[in-house]
Image (spheres, helix red, strand yellow):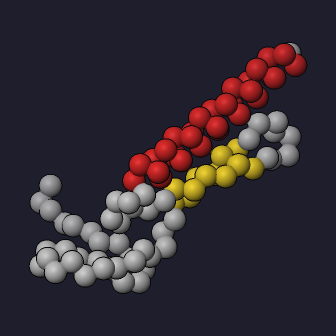
Amino acid sequence: MTTLRGIVNSARTLAYYTRLQEVTANNLANGSTDGFKVDRMTANRIKDVDSLISIEQTDLSQGSLRITGRPLDVGLEGEGYLVVDTPR
């Protein structure tokens, strides 16, 4: 039984590190995209659980604003989201 538990714990830990690599790759690929929000991933150990428990959070802090001079470009200053309402 302990061998199976070790395999399961190893698989869960590998799944965590695989997801961490995906999150890091996505952050690197989109880091220069206007309006991109960085994802952060950490791991915690919970009592009586041998594997890592992942916690993902998106950094919702405001980025820098720049004037583009284009009439259809918009930006929000402060907290909030821009929502587009369409018939569909």
Q: Is residue 23 left or right of residue 13?
A: left
Query: For the N terminus, which image quadrant?
Result: top right
Q: Is residue 2 above or below residue 88?
A: above
Q: Is residue 33 left or right of residue 12?
A: left
Residue at the image point whose x is 67% and y is 52% from the top: 42
Q: Quadrant of residue 6?
A: top right
Q: Is residue 83 above or below residue 13?
A: below
Q: Residue 10: image x %, image y %?
A: 74, 27
Q: Is residue 22 above or below residue 61?
A: above
Residue at the image point whose x is 27% and y is 69% from the top: 83
Q: Is residue 65 left or right of residue 45?
A: left
Query: For the C terminus, which image quadrant?
Result: bottom left
Q: Nearer the viewer, residue 49 or 41?
A: 41
Q: Is residue 56 left or right of residue 73?
A: right
Q: Nearer the viewer, residue 56 or 22?
A: 22
Q: Quadrant of residue 73?
A: bottom left
Q: Residue 49: image x %, image y %?
A: 81, 39
Q: Residue 80: image x %, image y %?
A: 38, 77
Q: Quadrant of residue 71?
A: bottom left
Q: Residue 43: image x %, image y %?
A: 71, 49
Residue at the image point whose x is 33% and y is 65% from the top: 34
Residue at the image point whose x is 77% and y is 36% from the top: 51
Q: How many marks?
A: 0
